[in-house]
Image (cartoon, rainbow, N blue to C red):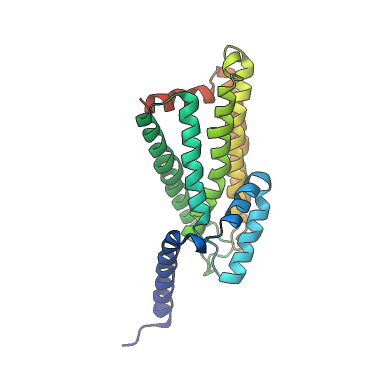
Amino acid sequence: MLPSQNGVTTSRMRRSRSSRRFDYFRRMLKWRHMDFEFALWQMFYLCADPSRVYKNFRYHKQTKNIWARDDPAFLVLLAAWLCGSSIFYTVVCSFSFEGFIYFLLWTVFVECIGIGLVVASILWYLTNRFGKADPNDSQQVEWAYAFDIHLNAYFPTLIILHMVQVFLLHMYVIESIHSTVTVLFLGNALWLMALSYYSYITFLGYSSLAFLKKTVLFLYAIPLFFLLYIVAALLGLSCSSLARDFYTELAK
């Protein structure tokens, strides 16, 4: 018995996705085939104007018929940033070499990859299950694209929380006014900025998919973050100090 047309199509799609994944990881071993200049351009505009990055994703879809990146250069550079920011954090906070290893492993495998896998998988399922404007539409949110959205949103968050925040701590801008209300607004403002930026970039990523509806819901998290910012300030909770204390314990 010949397989049905839908069965053949599904089988081809699976082989195609498997082939793309193989090619993606194989290109990591071929540095000359990676476009690091373009990856740096993306990183710059994710911080300066993330909407420009997603315009390029739409162009990528039109030319290659996939939303997710097929060039691992961004992932390689992100790994370099993770290592660099971890070294910077280690030097500022005077971690031991062993502490640096623990901190780096936590940052890479928990904050970046672990949380990314959870967030991408949940949003991938919810958008495909409930987010389509037309439930009968055959178009699907690619899981790899959902993970790319997380990586895009995570990069500015990394810069704000692991570099800008630590720089301020090192310059004693926050520590010198630890007993005042100002530290709460200054330190927590960085967390508010980072989480709001994460939500905004996530919104841009999913709103680029025309077959999804009500993607503005991703922006609803921002007022919630602002409310938590006010509550934390009123309760005297400094997210910057709490994060530093947690990482210090982790690095022991």
Residue at figure coordinates x 57%, y 38% from the top left? 159
Near-viewer residue (187 or 88): 88
Near-viewer residue (119 or 32): 32
Give coordinates of residue 230: x percent, y percent. Answer: 61, 25
Residue at figure coordinates x 41%, y 37% from the top left? 104
Quadrant in the picture for residue 98: top left
Residue at figure coordinates x 49%, y 52% from the top left? 75
Near-viewer residue (69 or 167): 167
Split into 4 quadrants, where in the image is the N terminus?
bottom left
In this picture, residue 54 sits left or right of residue 12: right
Disc count in the image?
Answer: 0
The residue furthest front is 32
Split into 4 quadrants, where in the image is the C terminus?
top left
Give coordinates of residue 170: x percent, y percent. Answer: 56, 23
The residue furthest bottom is 1
**Res. 75 in view:** yes
The residue furthest left is 1
**Res. 228 in view:** no
Q: Please tell me whether residue 151 is drawn above or below residue 225 in the rendered image.
A: below
Residue at figure coordinates x 43%, y 49% from the top left? 117
Give coordinates of residue 38: x percent, y percent. Answer: 60, 57
Give coordinates of residue 194: x percent, y percent. Answer: 58, 36
